[in-house]
Image (tube, rainbow, N blue to C red):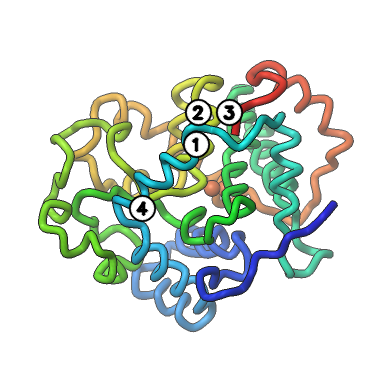
Amino acid sequence: MSSQPIALDEMNPLLDLDQWDDFLEGRYKEGKTESEFRQYDAEATPGVAEFYRLNHQYQTHAYVLGKEKEYFGLTRGEKSIWEAAEFLNTLVDDSDPDTDLTQLEHLLQTSEAIRRDGHPRWMVATGFVHDLGKCLCLYGEPQWGVVGDTFPTGCAYDPAIVFPEYFQTNEDYNNPIFQTKYGIYEPNCGLDKVKLSFGHDGYIYEVMKNYLPMEALYMLRYHSFYAWHRHGAYDHLCNEQDRAMLPAVLKFNPYDLYSKGHTKPNLAELKPYYDDLFAEFFPAKLRW
Ligand SMILES: [Fe+2]
Ligand SMILES: [Fe+2]
């Protein structure tokens, strides 16, 4: 398998994409306060702070519209789920190969944890596919355009978003229309109408939206929207459907945050189950 390490240039301050996931896990698992995890961040992982600085600076409303136009038409070819997972697996990092899991192993750990807890098959499938959108990195997108907490653009930034002060360098910050409570949106317009910052969540939702139930699609589309699902922000943009689906997003979140272990899943053993599972929900090839 070929490997394409992420360039450690100034636009990609994380060692690898997992560094963001690890930061999230630390932030929520240990119940750190805002000031505690900032300290943790500045001292232990300065790359994470720099990553959020870039994310908050460059994810403007115009940037989101441009990236949605670029990717949401799904013109990047057709792949099966396995092919997409293999493709994502070419995203390797420079960490210890003996203890670190591949992207595919991370996907399997998430889906296997969901399966062990007896959840429906569509949720197991959701666990497997939820981070396949990280292939955006392999299309050349910077880390800050692929991962990170997502947030609405075109309206005021809620202080519950991690590192809110970094928004001061976003050009939308000085646009008075974008900085009101509702911004360009109608009250309770529904999250479907809200342009969230661009990343792997929105992209995988577009790929999957014809194939999985609504609960699954909410899990995919909003799994990094922590300000909403963990902090209760932006309820004023939500409609009744969004509120009804929030418990599903919350049900999924622990599997995303905490299912990473260091036991490597046995792919050969698991493959027949997943072949059946994918055949149940997905066509042989999906558009990406
Ligand atoms: Fe994710
Ligand atoms: Fe994830």
Kindly report the distance in space between the C-alpha atoms of the residues bearing marks 1 and 4: 21 Å
Residue name at image x 42 percent, y 39 percent? 69
- Residue 144 rendering spot, x and y as whole percentages: 47, 61
Say which amino acid is labelled 4.
Tyr
- Asked if 196 appears above or below 55 in the picture, the reply is above
Say which amino acid is labelled 2.
Ala
Say which amino acid is labelled 1.
Leu
- Pointer 3 or 4: first along the chain: 4
- The answer to whether marks 3 and 2 mark residues whose Cβ atoms lie closer than 8 Å is yes
Question: Which one is in front, 158 or 2?
Answer: 2
- Pointer 4 or 2: first along the chain: 4
- Asked if 199 appears above or below 210 in the picture, the reply is below
Q: Which residue is mark 2?
A: 216
Q: Which residue is mark 3?
A: 123
- Residue 135 rendering spot, x and y as whole percentages: 62, 47
- The answer to whether marks 2 and 1 mark residues whose Cβ atoms lie closer than 8 Å is yes
Residue name at image x 12 percent, y 52 percent? 177
Where disc 3 sits, the SS reads helix
Kindly report the distance in space between the C-alpha atoms of the residues bearing marks 1 and 3: 10 Å
- The answer to whether marks 3 and 4 mark residues whose Cβ atoms lie closer than 8 Å is no
